[in-house]
Amino acid sequence: MKTQAPKAKQLIILSGKGGTGKTSISAAFAHLSASDHLPAQAVIVDADVDAANLGLVLKPEIGPANDFWGSSLAVIDSDLCINCLACSPVCRYDAIFPDPQIADVQWIDPIACDGCAACVYACPVNAISMVKQQEGNWFHSKTAFGPLFHAELFPGKENSGKLVTLIRQQARLYAEDTRANLIIIDGPPGIGCPVISACAGTDFGLIITEPSLAGLHDLKRVLGTLRHFHIPSVVCINKADIYPEGARAIREFAKAENIELIGEIPYDENLPKSMINGDPITVSFPDSPAALAVRELWQKVLRLLDVQEDLA
């Protein structure tokens, strides 16, 4: 009888804003996951669909583009419209105007339309319909360190949370098919809708912060979000030695909140150099202080997740 594959553990890596080193650490984890003899390669997710940049470091072989269909917008069929103006008063977004190209016909501005469909129900001749809109693409790409699921939301489009959920679902299904035991999610910055979609249902949260007042403020916000979803979390301070007072404040906060401070990564000029090279720091400068600290952080995360290496 075929045994069911164990469910892959999902690690979400978050920070309160961009620039704290979250993606650099995610890229290094992807490299280490492929180097540390896990039973199967980790599945990697770049959940920042508004400004995905993990691919800049992992250098993926981009897979085919898959359409992401988001919300629906109202469209008027000019052949059916009788210009009765029943639609205009019910539109709370002032999106309906006389068509500038066709006389005695109404037109709906797709930018102003919110997709509420009130005009559809108001039209007496069924001249208005809701049309699905393509709002982005998602990709299943290959990297030297494992499969990468990522996406691109078109400029000005919404539903970023829905797109994040979609690529996470695809990554989970792929992990089940390949019996991978770990999914590494490079989360979006902040605490908004994309972050909620990225972290809900994950097994463990790693919060990357920096020693500053802003870093401490963002840490509190992200920790509150993860705790809302009952996700066990730990903290790592990046560039921990550039402002000792700020690092001390974060240590005191972590102690007061009973959250484990799992690592402190020193400032290392090799880190931006590795980014320029387009490689994780554990590849470009494996013996550098930051790379050694990231490797130690990785081993601690594996133990907390109870992800075992294949020692065979």
Image: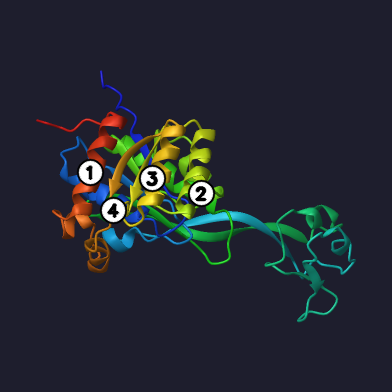
Vertically, is 306 above or below 180?
above
Vertically, is 118 above or below 178?
below
Specify the amino acid type for callout 1.
Ser
Secondary element at tag 1 = helix
Which quadrant of the view contains residue 261? top left
The mark nearer the N terminus, 3 or 4, is: 4
The residue located at (71%, 58%) in the rendering is: 114
Specify the amino acid type for callout 2.
His
Crowding at dot 1, Cα within 10 Å, few <14 / some 14-19 / many 20+, comes out as many
Q: List the residue tagged with mark 3.
A: 248
**Label disc, if present, on residue 27 of the rendered structure:** 4
Inter-mark Cα distance, 4 to 2: 25 Å
Secondary element at tag 4 = helix
The mark lying in front, picked from 4 and 2, is: 2
Specify the amino acid type for callout 4.
Ala
The mark lying in front, picked from 2 and 3, is: 3
Q: Are marks 1 and 4 in contact (CB under 8 Å)?
A: no
Q: Which residue lies furthest to the bottom in this view?
A: 101
Of residues 309 and 150, the one nearer the viewer is: 309
Quadrant showing the C terminus: top left
Inter-mark Cα distance, 1 to 2: 31 Å
Q: List the residue tagged with mark 1.
A: 33
86 left or right of 165?
right
137 left or right of 179?
right
Q: Do the residues labelled 1 and 2 touch (CB within 8 Å)?
A: no
Applied colour scheme: rainbow
